[in-house]
Image (cartoon, rainbow, N blue to C red):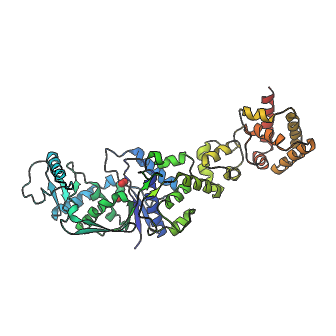
């Protein structure tokens, strides 16, 4: 059997961290088995679905590298199949038309509330023989006795007494099929073998299993992933970092750091914390997904981000750094050579891009405080000596570093007396990677032009 999983988000809200983790687990499970992973956008709720939310799903998944097989499937386009299934159930007597008005249903609920009973449809129209000429919904005839078991790969076996499951509406008055019916038809039609989704759907699952059986379809395996809570144990909200997944990009996170973090949020592999994408695919299983909610830990995400920024191949960071740099790097050093100078010192990609900017853009101003601190009477002479040396000898970062050491040594001052003013003139501030690396990357012409321009500006 080839494993086939899916991610089936409703584009009614932004794809956030919880949804992204569901997508990741579903994707990892398929990739682990060399199976297929499909993306199905459940856009049947036309009023609440937005193009913006769909775009965040597509962009977020692409950014995280969760590639899907084939084209994304839009559930709204498959309505004919859902309607056909409803009609089949009606024809076979496994569903019925319900004419109960809203008032009648409200009264039913109120009576149940007063009697201390669970609010559920009481089956009034189940055995109706006449067909009044009023609007109707179609309800699924749920078995009245017995039990429905969900054999969940994460939560274990969960039993639902059928008497607690009422007859669900599978088609609304306007003729549109509802979620539980559509999801069964689509998962069966697409040959989904494993439904991996959030545990907020667990209560829908016995209803869906009953429909698979009524439609004579193979029931897939289910894996319900416990929810993510905030660090304080409360339900995850914006305050806890539950922002649209694309916002994590804006905040300077590396997609793999997010994947690594999300994988560990609920799944474990011994005590390991750091996994490459290949390792995640190799090790991932549902048996090691925990059955209780996990807590979101911002510090751990930040730590993994800094870790992966350091540990990544520079070439793999180029696109993400360019996303923040937003400038033409053709006239300066190759970005792939600049990145290693900054990987160790950057906590996130925004910091890395900020550090890289000086290699492509000359400063237009110089930090006043730094100038005051580092420019003294003797500074101009040290700078002159450096310029003379650089103009007469072969240039390299190491050579420039040596000249600074030699000039300062001869004057009996420490290297910072010349290195810091040079930094300020080339970067506008007294921070940059080590001076040999910085000057090597910037090159002779650009270094000397910036130093000379800076001297003129500061002297005037
Ligand atoms: N469309 C549903 C949602 O976004 C998920 C359906 C499912 O995974 O079965 O909550």
Image quadrant of residue 307? Answer: bottom right
Residue lying farthest right? 410
Left or right of 103: which side holds 159? Answer: right
Q: Residue at x 41, y 71 (%)?
A: 2
Relative image position of residue 441 (x, y in whole percent)? 75, 48
Quadrant in the picture for the C terminus = top right
Quadrant in the picture for the N terminus = bottom left
Q: Residue at x 28, y 58 (%)?
A: 180
Compared with residue 211, is residue 388 higher up or lower down, i.e. above or below? above
Residue lying farthest bottom? 1
Relative image position of residue 8 (x, y in whole percent)? 38, 57
Compared with residue 435, is residue 65 higher up or lower down, i.e. above or below? below
Residue lying farthest left? 130
Residue 449 appears in the picture as rendered: no
Relative image position of residue 237 (x, y in whole percent)? 43, 47
Residue 444 appears in the picture as rendered: yes
Residue sitting nearer the eye, 69 or 214:
214
Left or right of 240: which side holds 303? Answer: right
Image quadrant of residue 359? Answer: top right
Residue lying farthest top? 460
- Count every numbered label the image shows and give the total: 0
Relative image position of residue 250 (x, y in whole percent)? 54, 45
Q: Quadrant of ligand 1?
A: bottom left
């Amino acid at each position: 059997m080839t494993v086939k999983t899916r991610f089936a988000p409703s584009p009614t809200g932004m794809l956030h961290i919880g949804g992204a983790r569901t997508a990741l687990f579903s994707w990892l499970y398929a990739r682990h088995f060399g199976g297929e992973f499909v993306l199905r956008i459940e856009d049947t709720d036309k009023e609440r679905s937005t193009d913006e939310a769909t775009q965040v799903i597509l962009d977020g998944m692409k950014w995280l590298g969760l590639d899907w097989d084939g084209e994304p499937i839009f559930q709204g386009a498959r309505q004919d199949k859902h309607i056909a299934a409803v009609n089949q159930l009606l024809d076979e007597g496994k569903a019925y038309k319900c004419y109960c008005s809203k008032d009648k249903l409200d009264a039913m609920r109120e009576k149940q509330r007063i009697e201390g009973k669970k609010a559920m449809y009481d089956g009034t129209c189940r055995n109706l023989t006449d067909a009044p000429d009023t609007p109707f919904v179609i309800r699924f005839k749920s078995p009245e006795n017995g039990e429905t078991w969900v054999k969940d790969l994460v939560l274990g076996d969960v039993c639902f007494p059928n008497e607690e499951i009422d007859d669900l509406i599978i088609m609304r008055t306007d003729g549109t099929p509802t979620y539980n019916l559509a999801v069964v038809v689509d998962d069966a039609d697409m040959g989904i073998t494993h439904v991996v989704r959030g545990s907020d759907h667990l209560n829908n699952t016995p209803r869906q299993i009953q429909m698979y059986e009524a439609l004579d379809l193979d029931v897939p395996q289910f894996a319900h992933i416990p929810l993510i809570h905030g660090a304080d144990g409360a339900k995850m909200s914006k305050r806890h970092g539950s922002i649209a997944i694309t916002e994590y990009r804006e905040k300077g996170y590396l997609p793999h750091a997010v994947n690594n973090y999300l994988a560990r949020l609920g799944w474990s592999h011994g005590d390991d914390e750091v996994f490459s994408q290949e390792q995640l695919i190799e090790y991932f299983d549902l048996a090691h997904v925990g059955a209780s909610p996990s807590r979101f830990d911002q510090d751990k995400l930040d730590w993994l981000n800094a870790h992966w920024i350091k540990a990544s191949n520079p070439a793999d960071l180029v696109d993400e750094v360019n996303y923040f740099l937003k400038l033409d790097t053709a006239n300066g050093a190759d970005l792939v050579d600049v990145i290693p100078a900054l990987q160790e010192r950057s906590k996130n990609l925004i910091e890395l891009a900020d550090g890289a900017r000086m290699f492509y853009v000359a400063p237009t101003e110089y930090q006043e405080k730094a100038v005051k601190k580092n420019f003294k009477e003797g500074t101009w002479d040290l700078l002159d000596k450096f310029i003379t040396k650089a103009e007469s000898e072969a240039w390299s970062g190491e050579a420039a570093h040596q000249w600074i050491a030699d000039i300062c040594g001869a004057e009996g001052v420490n290297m910072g007396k010349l290195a810091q003013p040079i930094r300020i003139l080339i970067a506008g501030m007294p921070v940059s990677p080590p001076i040999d690396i910085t000057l090597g990357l910037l090159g002779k012409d650009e270094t000397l032009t910036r130093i000379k321009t800076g001297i003129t500006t500061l002297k005037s």
